[in-house]
Image (cartoon, grey):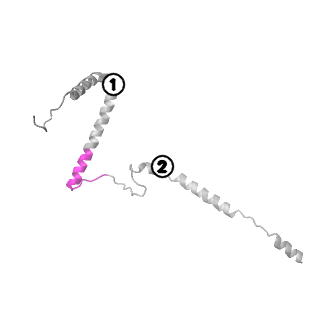
Amino acid sequence: MATETAKKKGTPQILKTDTAQKLAEKWVASMTRSTEKDPVEAEQEARPHRLGLGAKVSKEMKRKPSDDPIDQKLQAKFDAGRRKHARLVADAAGSSKNAGDDDSEEEDESESKSKAFGKKKENTSTPR
C-alpha cells in the first residue's frame, strides 16, 4: 500500500480543459461581428475638421447671428477672408486655363517692378 500512495503522490493527474481558449475564441468572434455592423469610418468622415476626439458634435451646425458687436466684427473679417480665398482660387483656376495669354502681363509686371526698385525715396526725416 505504501507504494501505491507513493505513485499517486509522485505523478499528479493533469486535467486538460480548453475552456479558456473557447472563451477567448467566442470573445474575439463577437468583437469582429460588432465592428462589421457598425460603420466606424462613416462616422469619422461626418466629424468636423480639427474637432477633438472627446468633443461633442451637434447635429445643428448652423450659426445664428450674434448681438455682440465684437463677435459681429470678427465674423465679418472671417467672411471677408473666406470670400477672398474663394476669389483667389477662382482666379488661379482661370489663370491656369489662360496660361498662353499671360506673356504680355508678365512683361508689364517685370517693368513695373524694375521701376519701383529703381526709384529712390527722398529722406524727409533729416532737414537739408
Q: Residue at x 24, y 46 (%)?
A: 77
User: Is 68 above or below relative to 85?
Assistant: below
Q: Is residue 86 magenta?
A: no
Residue farthest toward the front in the current orientation of the protein: 128
Whichever of labels 1 and 2 marks the residue nearer the N terminus, that label is 2
Q: Amino acid at mark 2?
A: Glu
Q: In the picture shown, does residue 112 fall above or below 51? A: above
**Up/down of 104 relative to 37, above or below:** above
Question: What residue did someone put label 2 on?
Answer: 41
Tell me, yes or no, whether the highlighted magenta stretch contains residue 66: yes
- State the extent of the magenta-drawn residues as a range: 62-79
Q: What x and y, as percent, mark residue 61?
A: 33, 52
| Amino acid residing under circle 1 | Ala
Q: Is residue 79 above or below residue 24?
A: above
At 39% across and 50% down in the image, what residue appears? Answer: 50
Q: Nearer the viewer, mark 1 or mark 2?
A: 1
Q: Secondary structure at mark 1?
A: helix
Q: Quadrant of residue 120?
A: top left
Left or right of residue 13: residue 71: left
**Left-right relation of 81 to 41:** left
Q: Position of residue 127 (x, y in %)?
A: 10, 37
